[in-house]
Amino acid sequence: MTTTTLDKNKELIEKINYLRRKKNAIILAHYYQRGEIQDIADIVGDSLELARKAQQTDADIIVFAGVRFMAETAKILNPEKKVLHPNPESGCPMADMATYEALKRMKKEHPDAVVVAYINTNADVKTLADIIVTSRNAVKVVKSLDAKKIIFVPDKFLGSYIAKQVPEKEFILWEGFCPPHFNLTAEQLLELKKKYPNSKIAVHPECNTTAIEVADFVGSTSQIIQFATTCEADTVIIGTEVGLKHQLEKINPNKNYVFPETADYCGVVHCCDMKKNTLDKILDVLENETNEITLPQEVIEKAKIPLERMTQIV
Ligand code: 13P
Ligand code: SF4
């Protein structure tokens, strides 16, 4: 970052700090956010940690620096709060791959199946789910269900990963996937493993199945951080979005974290949507209380049921 950018950020951060104190606001940020946003957040976490924090906070305003489904989840879990989303353009392409009408049709075709929805779904889709999961708790939650037949929506790779761990159940997988993680291949990971033979490979379960198969560790963003910063290897090959680098280097700077080059336009696993939030936009929503997440009451009430079922299990 240039000195001018640093000065500008310093000024923005001072204003943000003043306003968040004055308005009793909390800033929640996902690990894929820009480094400067992670640095000012009250909590940085994976989807489950952020959902829990949103549920428990006594702040009056939640500024959610993440993609839209995350901000919606905060609103559903704590509807009395004002939830502000710095950039309403920040959506999740995978969440948009599952629509309400299409899932309704699938449910009709399989009336005996239980619908397990990844938290990466839009609020209306959550209203059709029996239970929600995140990458951190998916296997545990699915194992705890009585049902024999599961519709898993929308991530087919996370779904396949769960299905392998829970072979006693039948899975009907939605054809969705995360475009940034999809670009990462097993070959790219193995190429790096050749270069760093004593390294470990840690990947997110949104990666495609072949990449997951060559990993030493599979977990949520927080779990990857925990593994990578504490495992015995000096070099860890990281198969997830590059925003994680910031936190890894902050927590344990003595290790080498290698993010594989991919066919993505920016050369690594990179989520453009996550990067649409900026310090300027955070200041703007705090100042003007704009971009408030609003959802129909019926959607909040219905989507809350499967979300709370999840938070009661884990
Ligand atoms: P977690 O942070 O829960 O691992 O999820 C990552 C993700 O999909 C963000 O889009
Ligand atoms: Fe969606 Fe993938 Fe971006 Fe996460 S990383 S917000 S799943 S597109």
Image (cartoon, grey):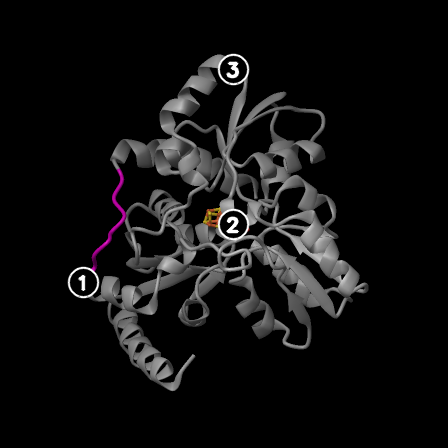
- Asked if disc 2 and disc 1 are in contact, CB closer than 8 Å, the reply is no
Q: Main secondary structure of the magenta part?
A: loop
Q: Pointer 3: what residue?
A: 110
Q: Which residue is mark 1?
A: 288
Q: Measuring 54% from the left and 55% from the top, which residue is drawn there?
A: 269
Taking 282 as reference, is 2 above or below it?
below
Q: Disc 3 versus disc 1: distance between alpha carbons?
A: 47 Å
Q: Write the start and end of the magenta stretch as one range.
A: 289-295
Residue 180 disc label: 2
For the residues labelled 2 and 1, the Cα–Cα distance comes to 33 Å
Numbered disc in front, either 2 or 1: 2
Q: Is 290 covered by the magenta stretch?
A: yes
In three-dimensional space, the C-alpha distance between marks 2 and 3, rounded to whole angstroms, equals 31 Å
Viewed as shown, does residue 106 lie left or right of 283?
right
Callout 2 amino acid: Pro
Front residue of this view, candidates 119 and 190:
190
Q: Does mark 2 have its CB less than 8 Å from ligand 2? A: yes
Position in image of residue 67 (x %, y %): 39, 51
